[in-house]
Image (spheres, grey):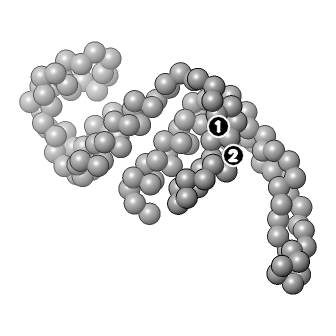
Amino acid sequence: MKKTDILYLLAIMLLIYCFSGTLFQPASPVLDMEPLENPANQGENVTQAVAEPNINARAAVVMDFETGTVLYEKNPYTKRPMASTTKIMTAIIALEHASLEENVVISKQAAYMGGSTMGLKEGSTVKMKELLYG
């Protein structure tokens, strides 16, 4: 699995977390499942979902990365706040253009950017990994 695939998966998980406030429901099954006979496979059991998943989030999307097929969606066309999308895209672009161990020299503009709590100083050198954590 490529680095970008993992990042996209993490991005989707983060978005689901932001919309729901919780990522997982405590000890309850997501789907009620029933084994069914599959006549095409001579007696092999297959599982079929018999209920919608219980998703607490206001909106959610589950996609197959290989095909792009949407497997589940809840309120897919409702406009939602951006949440951490900018941070996720910044991380994706940074990883596409630099390695995690690469040293990055902090520019004057980056050092004086509002909202930062990392305490970056102009001219200092920080590893890309640390910048992404920040």
Badge 2 marks a residue whose secondary structure is strand
Secondary structure type for disc 1: strand
Q: Quadrant of residue 104?
A: top left
User: Which comes before the other along the chain, label 1 or label 2?
Assistant: 1
Residue 134 numbered mark, or none: none
Q: Quadrant of the N terminus?
A: bottom left
Q: Is residue 131 visible?
A: yes
Observer-nearest residue: 127 or 68? 68
Along the viewing direction, whichever of 33 and 36 lies nearer the viewer = 36
- Which residue is denoted by mark 2 in the rendering? 72
Q: Quadrant of residue 17?
A: top right
Whether pointer 1 and pointer 2 mark residues with C-beta atoms closer than 8 Å, the reply is yes
Rounded to the nearest angstrom, the CA distance separating label 1 from label 2 is 8 Å
Q: Position of residue 46 (x, y in %)?
A: 82, 70
**Mark 1 = which residue?**
60
Residue 51 versus residue 88 in the image, above or below: below
Q: At 39% across and 52% down in the image, what residue appears?
A: 4
Residue type of the residue flagged with mark 1: Ala
Q: Is residue 55 above or below residue 49?
A: above
> Where residue 107 sits in the image (x, y, percent)?
13, 28
Residue sitting nearer the eye, 96 or 30: 96
Residue depicted at 44% across the width and 54% down the height: 5
Neighbours of disc 2 within 10 Å: few (<14), some (14-19), many (20+): few
Residue at image position (78%, 44%) is: 53
| Residue lying at the far top of the rendered structure | 114
Q: Amino acid at mark 2?
A: Tyr
Residue 61 is left or right of residue 5, and the answer is right
Q: Quadrant of the C terminus?
A: top left
The relative height of residue 76 versus residue 102 in the rendered view (above or below) is above
Q: Is residue 80 above or below residue 33?
A: above
